[in-house]
Image (tube, rainbow, N blue to C red):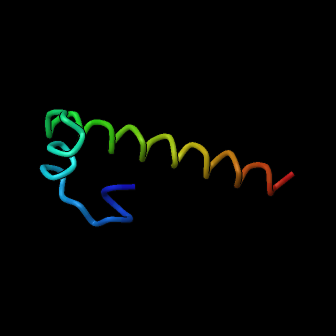
């Protein structure tokens, strides 16, 4: 939400959340993978 809704940079997110910038990047990356999987699952259900 902070990245894509509030348009915050990774360093800003890290500071606000009290975590390392690398952690922010990793969580964003993992989140994208989860979203991609969910979209593929939903597309598969539409074909049934």
Q: Is residue 10 above or below residue 22?
A: below
Q: Give whichever of 37, 8 is nearer the camera.
A: 8
x and y, in percent, of residue 22 in the image: 16, 36
Residue 35, position in %: x, y? 52, 47
Give the residue displayed 42% in from the left and 42% down from the top. 31
Quadrant of the snapshot with the N terminus: bottom left
* Residue 42: % across, % down: 71, 51
Relative to 9, 7 lies left or right = right
Left-right relation of 17 to 6:
left
* Residue for point 61% across, 45% down: 38
Which residue is outermost to the right? 48
Return the x and y of residue 25 as percentages of the image width and height: 23, 42
Residue at x 33% of width, y 42% of height: 29
Dividing the picture into quadrants, the one containing residue 33 is top left
Residue 23 figure quarter: top left
The total number of labels drawn is 0
Compared across the picture, whether 15 is left or right of 25 comes to left
- Taking depth in this image into account, of 4 and 26 the one nearest to the observer is 4
Q: Nearer the viewer, residue 46 or 30?
A: 30
6 or 47, nearer to the observer:
6
Does residue 39 sit above or below 30 in this rendering?
Answer: below
């Amino acid at each position: 939400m902070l990245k894509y809704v509030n348009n915050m940079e990774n360093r800003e997110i890290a500071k606000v959340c009290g975590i390392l910038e690398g952690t922010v990047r990793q969580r964003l990356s993992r989140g994208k993978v989860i979203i991609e999987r969910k979209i593929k699952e939903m597309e598969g259900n539409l074909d049934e």
